[in-house]
Image (spheres, grey):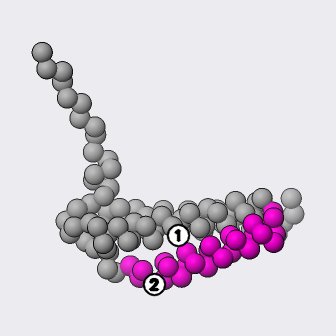
Amino acid sequence: MDVLSALYIAANVMASVSYIPQIMTLLKDKTRSESVAMASWILWLSASAISLTYFVVRVQDHIVIFASSVNFTGCLIVLSLLAFNRVLKADGICLYEIIKKPVVQKEPTS
């Protein structure tokens, strides 16, 4: 593997990790997340989809396709959470608290 390939992989790992804080923010947000720009995430997802399609059809390099897929998935998760917060979620509800709640098992009745 050459230096440029290693740098490409490293850059995409860093970009992929950078989605985590945004995802956590959207999971913990108790509002409708109106401070997050939906139009930006739609554009980033669109650009990511076009890039992924180009890499699959023209480049056909598995490393590049994998890196682009991770980027596309990160954008898709963020935009999905943002859309959920804006459209479906009521104010005061935090998805993170719902997800982390322990499962309560009912005791069998005799």
User: Which picture quadrant has residue 87?
Assistant: bottom left
The structure residue drawn at horizontal position 32% and vertical position 56%, both measured from the top left corner, is 96
User: Which picture quadrant has residue 14?
Assistant: bottom right
75 vs 108: above or below: below
Q: Amino acid at mark 2?
A: Ala
Q: Amino acid at mark 1?
A: Cys
Mark 2: few/some/many CA within 10 Å (<14, 14-19, 20+) = few
Q: Which residues are magenta?
A: 36-61
35 vs 71: above or below: below
Residue 18 locus on image (x, y percent): 53, 67
Question: Which callout, 1 or 2, points at the residue further toward the start of the chain?
Answer: 2
The structure residue drawn at horizontal position 55% and vertical position 75%, both measured from the top left corner, is 45
Residue labelled with disc 2: 39
User: Which picture quadrant has residue 51?
Assistant: bottom right
Mark 1: few/some/many CA within 10 Å (<14, 14-19, 20+) = many
Q: Please, what is the dominant secondary structure of the magenta stretch? A: helix
Residue labelled with disc 1: 75
Is residue 30 visible to us here? no
Q: Quadrant of the C terminus?
A: top left
* Residue closest to the eye, 8 or 61: 61
- The residue sitting at the front extreme is 57
